[in-house]
Amino acid sequence: MLTRRRSRRERLAPNADINLINLVDLAFVLLIIFMIAAPMMQSGIELQLPKTDAAPVTAEQGVVVTVDREGSLFLGDVKMASMQELERTLPGYMRGKREIYVRGDERTVYGRVVEVLGRLKSLNLGEVTLMVDPEDAR
């Protein structure tokens, strides 16, 4: 008796199952990549604020002006070329906010922070407050 040879198409039945192993592997790889990359993507100005036992302040209520270690000025995360540029730009950033928070690096020259503080107070745009880190955060 002669047997008919089956063609390849007859031997392999269609399979409609989704292979989830590859999908799970990809999800884990992406999760690991994002867990490693997320801390690196945080933008901001690196500062060491002075430590004190004052109550913490939330900066969402006002505008943050930063004086970094070299004495450079930042309005939010934007670097200002000079004090005059900060004075021209600041009123547009206020938009109904009544507080200006000054963040000064503890390693910067004390006179520079006081100069910025005085100039901001003379603009009369709102209450000017210094920001510090809580002492127990050390």
Image: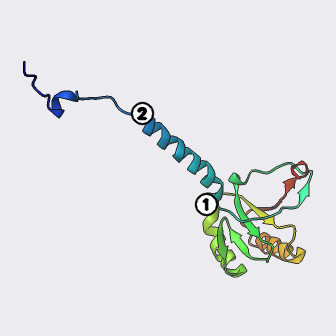
Q: Is residue 120 above or below residue 6?
A: below
Task: Name the foreground residue: 93 vs 53.
Answer: 53
**Numbered disc 2: secondary structure:** helix
Q: Quadrant of residue 102?
A: bottom right
Which comes before the other along the chain, label 2 or label 1? Answer: 2
- Residue type indicated by callout 1: Arg
* Residue at position x 91%, y 52% in the image: 135
In the rendering, at what x and y percent does residue 68 appear? 77, 71
Q: Position of residue 21 (x, y in %)?
A: 45, 35
Q: Which residue was labeled with disc 1? A: 95
**Amino acid bearing label 2:** Leu
Q: Quadrant of residue 40?
A: bottom right
User: Real-space Cα distance between discs 2 and 1?
Assistant: 51 Å
Residue 126, percent from left and from top: 74, 62
Q: Residue at x 72, y 54 (%)?
A: 59
Alpha-carbon neighbours of circle 2 within 10 Å: few (<14), some, or many (≥20)? few
Q: Which image quarter: residue 117?
A: bottom right
Q: Residue at x 89, y 53 (%)?
A: 138
What SS does tag 1 mark? loop
The colour scheme used here is rainbow
- Is 9 rendered above or below residue 40? above
Mark 2 = which residue?
A: 20
Q: Nearer the viewer, mark 2 or mark 1?
A: 2
Residue lying furthest left in this view?
Answer: 1
**Residue under the point 74% across and 76% down:** 72
* Residue 90 drawn at (x, y percent): 66, 70
Quick one: label 1, few (<14), some, or many (20+) residues within 10 Å? few
